[in-house]
Image: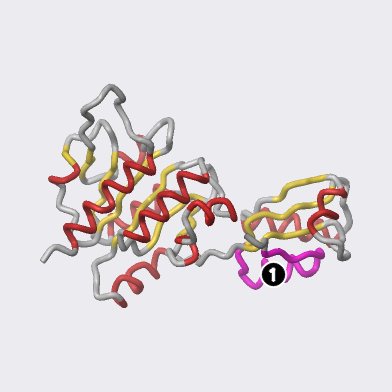
Amino acid sequence: MKENYIFGIRAVIEAINADKKVDKIVVRKGLNGDLFKELQELCQKRHVRMQFAQPEVLDRITTNNHQGVVAFLSDVEYISLDEIEAIAKSRGEEPFVVVLDGITDVRNLGAIARSADCAGVHAIIVPEKGSAPINGESIKTSAGALHYLPVCLTQKTFFAVKTLKDRGYKIVGATEHGADDYHKVDFRGPVAVVMGSEDKGISNQLLKLCDQNAKIDMYGHIESLNVSVAAGIILFEVANQRHAK
């Protein structure tokens, strides 16, 4: 996949101020000056990731006069929580979202996004920190689904889910310790399915917000599924219920 990037300190500052979604900024080690300080302060304010590297790293990215700064822009559509209802309404459907609570493997994120798009999910909610980056690798793993599936980035996953709950969404946690078989959960109406991290599952804070916790019964020796596989199974149960005649 061809990387989408811009270079030069002033150009990067203007891109951030214009609300362009910047995945990360690569900066030459030792760079300083007033304009660079302005960029640093802006990145801290907007929660933009900054990575320092040797000069030759930037030179390999571009042979143009980059001034020691190269910013990688996202090819993904980012939306706010408020826009999810509008997307669902435009399709004549009840809102259907997936919340990713600390998914750190880009391949899992991409695979979940692929299943989510195929199942008719209106958006996925991803924390800005503590999550796999949405980049070329995750887009590739999603088979391009992330070009079509809206992504909502949130600073605090808890508050995003709390907002959805207050708006009437049913919050369903997908966990091996759930009390309800996933195919017995009523997924009709506005719904948010929460998928937990690969190692710890859903955080206790989010579990307390869940209206139901759904499990997938295991019949072999292994007690759990890969999170992307589990997501695919549950999301298509949601899709089947919502599109049943």
Residue 8 is inside the magenta segment: yes
Q: Quadrant of the C terminus?
A: bottom left
In the image as oriented, which residue stretches furthest toward the bottom? 90
Residue 128 in the image, given as x and y percentages of width and height: 53, 51
What residue type is disc 1 on? Ala
Q: Is residue 189 rendered to the left or right of residue 141?
A: left
In the image as oriented, which residue stretches furthest toward the top? 221
Q: Is residue 43 above or below residue 17?
A: above
Residue plotted at (40% across, 50% down): 112
Residue 204 is inside the magenta segment: no
Residue plotted at (28% across, 22% down): 221
Residue plotted at (18% across, 62% down): 242
Residue 234 in the image, given as x and y percentages of width and height: 26, 47
Number of marks in picture: 1
Residue 83 in the image, given as x and y percentages of width and height: 40, 70
| Circle 1 crowding by C-alpha within 10 Å: few under 14, some 14–19, many from 20 | some
Q: In which quarter of the image is the N terminus?
A: bottom right
Q: In terms of image quadrants, where is residue 4?
A: bottom right
Q: Quick one: SS at disc 1?
A: helix
Q: Is residue 184 rendered to the left or right of residue 69?
A: left
User: Viewer-proximal residue, 180 or 143?
Assistant: 143
Span colored in magenta? 4-21
Residue plotted at (82% across, 54% down): 60
Mark 1 highlights which residue? 15
User: Viewer-proximal residue, 73 or 11?
Assistant: 73
Q: In terms of image quadrants, where is residue 167?
A: bottom left
Q: Is residue 199 above or below residue 230?
A: above
